Amino acid sequence: MDKIQETNIHIIKRYCKDHYIDNDLFLIDNIKRIPIPDSARRTNFIIIGMCTQGEAKYTVDTREFTVRAGETFIVSERHVINQFTLSDDFVAMSMVISVNFFHDIIRNVSEMSALFLYSRNHPVMRFDKKEQTVFRNYFDAIDRRISDKGNHFQKELIRVLMLAMFYDLSNVIYRNRKGKEKKQSRPDAIFTQFIKLVEAHCKTERRVSWYAQQLGITAKYLSEAVKHVSCRTPNEWIDNYVTLEMRVLLKNTTKPIKDIAKEMNFPNQSFLGKYFKENVGMSPSKYRKS
């Protein structure tokens, strides 16, 4: 096979019964319900889970990891996962989250973003007994809200619960990073600084060269460092944050699209429309009505 297959988030829906909301969040009480692929797959979503029994081995970008009972695991988007070996008694509860929904929840929380960036290279961490209980409680609480179809504020409530869970998970990541890593590698440090800059300036700056200049490095070196750490290019990260900001403005304000274009530093509404459609797959006006 010449090309690595992508695992689409829509495929997950058939294994979740009613435990999902839109195409943004899927809850799986036992990840074994999903057929294990027999070849390398590139994820286009994020998985956050906790092993409650047994163990599993797998590779992420050819690096081997083992997750055991009481450990949390995070699989970030765009990574290639392969070579799964699950013990017969393996059980893990998992959340599958769309990239857009994830970044929408943690937007403007720069320290949390930096901590989750650390987890891209350190995806398995141990929970203590209290943290295991807390994760189970979040999982159950979010599942109850997913079942509450008649609640007008359903998705907002789920968003708040997810943010609270991410804060608790970030604390585990922070503790893990503090205990294991005395000093960040140069590419990791550049990537973290780059993401913080993008979060702060994506409304006005979309040029990779500008971000490289702020970091005092060449655009080529920035591109190499970002691609090495995240498996995505700087342009892909910039586009992700820009379109996220646009989606928020389109869904949560009544601003005319021409005013959003001005706020997002586009020459005019037509340029914004073309950019948005290339990245989201539909026009801004259609997205606003969806």
Image (cartoon, rainbow, N blue to C red):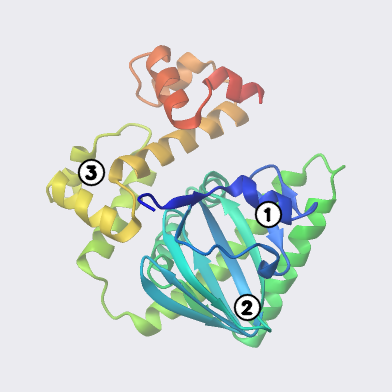
Quadrant holding the C terminus: top right
Of residues 193 and 72, the one nearer the viewer is 72
SS of the residue under disc 1: strand
Residue 263 falls in which quadrant of the image? top left
Mark 3 or mark 2: whose residue is earlier in sequence: 2
Amino acid identity at mark 3: Tyr
Instruction: Give x and y (percent) for residue 51.
Output: 62, 78
**Residue that mark 2 sits on:** 51
First-in-chain label (1 vs 3): 1
Q: Which residue carries the number 1 mark?
A: 26
- Picture quadrant of residue 28: bottom right
Identify residue type, mark 1.
Phe
Label 2 SS: strand
**What residue sits 84% from the left and 43% below the top?**
151
Q: Report, in whole angstroms, how far the alpha carbon at label 2 lies from the one at label 1.
A: 17 Å
Q: Position of residue 40 (x, y in %)?
A: 44, 61
Q: What's the CA distance linking mark 3 and mark 2? A: 39 Å
Residue positioned 61% across, 29% down in the render: 251
**Which of the two marks, 3 or 2, is nearer to us in this view?**
2
The residue indicated by pointer 3 is: 211
210 sits to left or right of 177: left
Say which residue appears at 35% left-offset and 42% top-offset. 236
